[in-house]
Image (cartoon, rainbow, N blue to C red):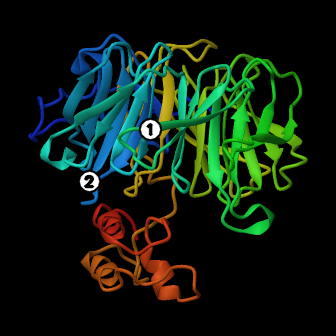
Amino acid sequence: MSRRKSTVGVLAGGLGLGLFVPAPAVAGFPSENVSMYSHLTLADFGATFAEDSWGYVSPSGREYAIIGISTGTGFVEITDPTNPVIVDIRLQANQGRDMKVYQNYVYSSSDDGPTYVYDVSEIDSGLVTRVHTFNAGTHNLAVDEVSGFLYLAIGGPMDIYDLSDPAFPDYVGTWPGQTHDAQVVTYTEGPYAGRQIAFVFAGWEGRVDIVDVTDKANIFLVGQTSYPSPVYTHHGWLTADRQILYVLDEVDELARTTIIDVSDLTNPTFISDFPNSEPSTDHNLYVHNGFIFEANYSSGLRVYDASDPLNPFEVGFFDTFPDSDDPGYIGAWNTYPFFPSGTVIVSDRAGGLFVLDVSAILPCQGDANGDGVVDPLDSGYVLARFGCPVGTGDSSCDDADQNGDGTVDPLDSGFVLARFGDCL
């Protein structure tokens, strides 16, 4: 797919509670099937560069982008994605390189540390509170929200912290293998039910290690695999059914995404890879709702349809760094596609925070009552079913779980409200 088929620009601005009202976004970003709600530049954050990003949804359903910048960590409300409001910028001793969320706490760190713990339980009122720091620097963070553990991938060993008291993480163990990054999940069914499994992207080792971290005093390797011509195994993410793992190698300059079969954790198997449409360096990816969202530095956000998980194909993009598509380490560092509203954010090293609309790609969602339109009746349908069980065969409960998190709660109502009139 050509990256030069269309160019879009959307004005951002408006009044809101926060530090200031952002200036209008600048037009001129090549795109296809992805448009821009709004854009906050590095100048808006008072920063010289940006790196990672993540998201938080408050109990009220309001959505927040979290972005790592040269001076620390920025918190931006994007509930109205056309009017982002910077709620707070928390200064840190070193930059905010990676951030992750557990319950109402945000963990932010950089290679030189320390790791900062922020309480965002009152962020709707504009309050972000630093509650703790611990002297552990890390390049990447991972959280297993089911078991409640925080993983610090420091480029060498991976340190593990218990989040029983999430404000004060407690060190409980280390995986000694090289770990650039990891995705850690707790299996709830199948042969690995009850096991906590880390998919470790082993950097210069050029492979994926699958590690059982259930017993922090007895961590062991379950399986491992590599792929053709590895250089630096950087990042990856599982499909929803945990059968396939997509992997990016940051340094190989082959513009590819690798597909690995992980249905048998003891024997992970390289299947194939598929090409990226531009030669830019790939960096981070996530899988959500059957789509792969990749932040590929100079070519920005690339979106792939993975409905056939062995044959993904590009269906859209938004180029956050239009000056070049060449390999290198400038441009889109990370994307976050997990907001219930469907809004997607991208953090760009040179461009700041982009708030994007991918609704042209995703199937229509929000029509909870199935009458062919997204309107207040859908919200009422969801409200009437708060608390009903999901996954028991009751289709009305399953339909009301609009954000797909396994429960019918106020977040589903917010998901529907955000889509009134968007699709039929």
Q: Residue at x 72, y 22 (%)?
A: 203
Helix, strand or loop under label 1: loop
- Residue that badge 2 annotates: 62
How packed is label 2: few (under 14 Cα within 10 Å), some, or many (20 or more)?
many
Residue 424 position (above or below residue 143): below
Residue 144 position (above or below residue 255): below
Q: Earlier in the sequence, mark 1 or mark 2?
A: 2
How packed is label 1: few (under 14 Cα within 10 Å), some, or many (20 or more)?
some
Q: Is residue 327 left or right of residue 52?
A: right
Identify the amino acid type marked 2.
Arg
Q: Is residue 356 left or right of residue 410?
A: right
- Residue that badge 1 annotates: 169
Using the numbered discs, state the Cα–Cα distance from disc 1 to disc 2 in whole angstroms. Answer: 26 Å
Q: Quadrant of the C terminus?
A: bottom left
Image x and y of residue 134, in percent: 41, 25
Image x and y of residue 238, in percent: 68, 48
| Nearest to the observer: residue 399 or residue 220 | 220
Q: Residue at x 69, y 41 (%)?
A: 217
Q: Residue at x 65, y 58 (%)?
A: 240
Residue 320 position (above or below residue 79): above
Image x and y of residue 251, in percent: 71, 16
The quadrant where residue 232 appears: top right
Q: Is residue 356 left or right of residue 285?
A: left
